[in-house]
Image: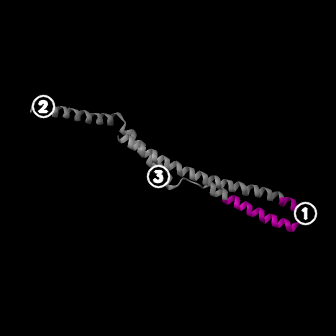
Amino acid sequence: MRAARLARFALEAERSRLALLVRRQVRTAGLWAAAGLFGVAAFATAHLLAWHLLSAQAEAARAAILLGADLVLLLIAALAASLQRPSRWEWEAERVRDRALQAAGESLRPAALVREVGLLRAASVFLSLYRMMRRRR
């Protein structure tokens, strides 16, 4: 039946979309983990910087440079993680799934079922008439 084929097609599209979604979520989680790591490093470096500012100027400059680098890497990783969007293939799989489900639903509407049942009924009537005609000969 057409509805079953369309439902299978929608299921395959949904499986593809979910696989792409999981791949994107794993990538995003990795980027957020990197951002968190650099955030912790920046926090620790800020404490070191404050400590060194109290004692020696030369070490403080090195700590400030390290803090700046950690903050830049933190911002890059956070920006990359926040910009993760569904891929073109993910959008396409979702559109295919939606179209297949819509078509499957339309084929299960009463009008479509009546049309299919009507065709079956007409075929059975013609078959009965054919059998009757053959018996007469």
Say which residue appears at 52% left-offset and 48% top-offset.
18
Q: Which of the two discs, 1 and 2, labels the residue nearer the N terminus?
A: 1
Q: Residues within 10 Å of mark 1 (few under 14, many from 20)?
A: few
In the picture provided, is 14 more to the left or to the right than 53?
left
Figure quadrant of the N terminus: top left
- Left or right of 106, for residue 13: right
Considering the numbered disc 1 on the image, is that residue within a helix, a strand or a loop?
helix
Q: Is residue 38 visible?
A: yes
Residue 128 on the magenta segment: no
Task: Read off the magenta span.
Answer: 48-76
In the rendering, at what x and y percent does residue 79 appear?
A: 64, 57
Task: Locate residue 93, reporting x and y percent.
Answer: 47, 50
Q: Which residue is mark 2?
A: 135
Tell me if mark 2 has few (under 14), some (14-19) or many (20+) residues whose alpha carbon lies within 10 angstroms of its own.
few
Main secondary-structure element of the magenta-colored stretch: helix
In the picture of the structure, the residue carrying the numbered disc 3 is 92
Q: Amino acid at mark 3?
A: Glu
